Each structure stands twice: as C-alpha cells, then as structure tokens.
Amino acid sequence: MNKIIIGNLEACDLPDLGIKDLHVRIDTGAKTSALHVDNLKRIKVGRRPYVAFDLHPDVYDLEQIVHCKAPVHDSRRIKSSNGEVEQRCVIETTLKLGEHEWPIELTLSNRQDMTYLMLLGREAMGDRVLVDPSESFLING
C-alpha cells in the first residue's frame, strides 16, 4: 500500500457531517482524534443514542455554523494535553484527505482554547500516512 505523505497541517473534509476544507492539526502524540464542537447535546433518534452539535468550520468566520448529528459510537475517558481526564462522546465518521477517504473515530470536545478545531491522532492515521513535520498542506483537494 502506498502511504500518503501529509504535513503537520492539512485541509480535510468530513463529508458525513457536511464539513469541507477544515484545517486539521496532525498530532502523532495523540492516540485519538478530537473535534471541537459547541452546543453538544445527547439525543435519541428512535431508540438509538445520537449527539447533536454545532461546528464553526472557519475560525475567521464565527457566523458560519454547521449543525451536525451523528450516532454515538462510544464514550471514553480521554486524557487531554493538559493532563485532565474527561469523559467524551466518540463518533465514527468519514475523513477525506484529497482523493483519499476512510472511516475514523472522533472524540467530541470543547477545544475553544486551541488554535485548530481538529486534531488527527495516530489511530486515525493508522498505516495510511507518513508525516513530514516540516511541511504543511501537502494534500491537494
């Protein structure tokens, strides 16, 4: 399998959630991937647990809001970079990097103090990518 070479920052799509051109920080130090969301609510669709949340895909245009809904895949205790442990909802969604796409797990959290709305962790990268930390935006959409 040919591996995709990615930089420390990439633009990705999350087509299942209706999100395009989201800048994601590549984080080989993080096991799981995380997405910053607002107004996270647990809801039921039929009998199945779902989460509803809002996302501002453009950090420079906070008026732009994407309303998302996804089935809850799991709930996990996650240790954040500041050492705090919190219980987070996990969803499964499709990650699209250029012409490549595959399913990933995303934890939903409040990353409002972070520069990037999404971190792509090791589990999501799997054996698909090589990271060149000296470069950014190597993938062409």
Image (cartoon, rainbow, N blue to C red):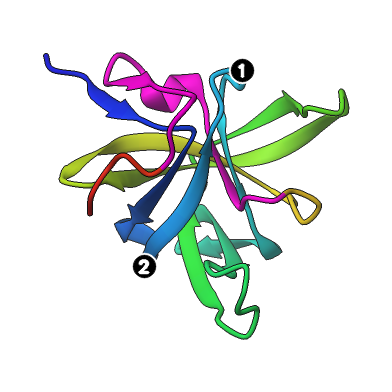
Image: magenta residue range: 115-136
Residue furthest to the front:
134
The 10 Å Cα crowd at callout 1, few under 14, some 14 to 19, many 20 or more, is few
Residue furthest to the left:
1
Q: Secondary structure at mark 2?
A: loop
Q: Which residue is mark 1?
A: 29
Residue type highlighted by circle 2: Gly
Q: Which residue is mark 2?
A: 18
Q: Nearer the viewer, residue 101 or 53?
A: 101
Residue type highlighted by circle 1: Gly
Q: Is residue 85 left or right of residue 98?
A: right
Q: Is residue 47 visible?
A: no
- The Cα–Cα distance between marks 2 and 1, rounded to whole angstroms, is 28 Å
Up/down of 108 relative to 80, above or below: below
Q: Nearer the viewer, residue 76 or 44?
A: 76
Provide residue 49's location: percent of width, then percent of height. 54, 52
Q: Is residue 3 visible?
A: yes
Precedes in sequence: disc 2 or disc 1: 2
Queried whether the magenta region covers residue 121, the answer comes back as yes
Provide residue 25's location: percent of width, then percent of height. 54, 39
Q: Residue at x 36, y 55 (%)?
A: 14
Q: Residue at x 87, y 23 (%)?
A: 83
Queried whether the magenta region covers residue 110, the answer comes back as no
Q: Is residue 94 left or right of residue 24?
A: left
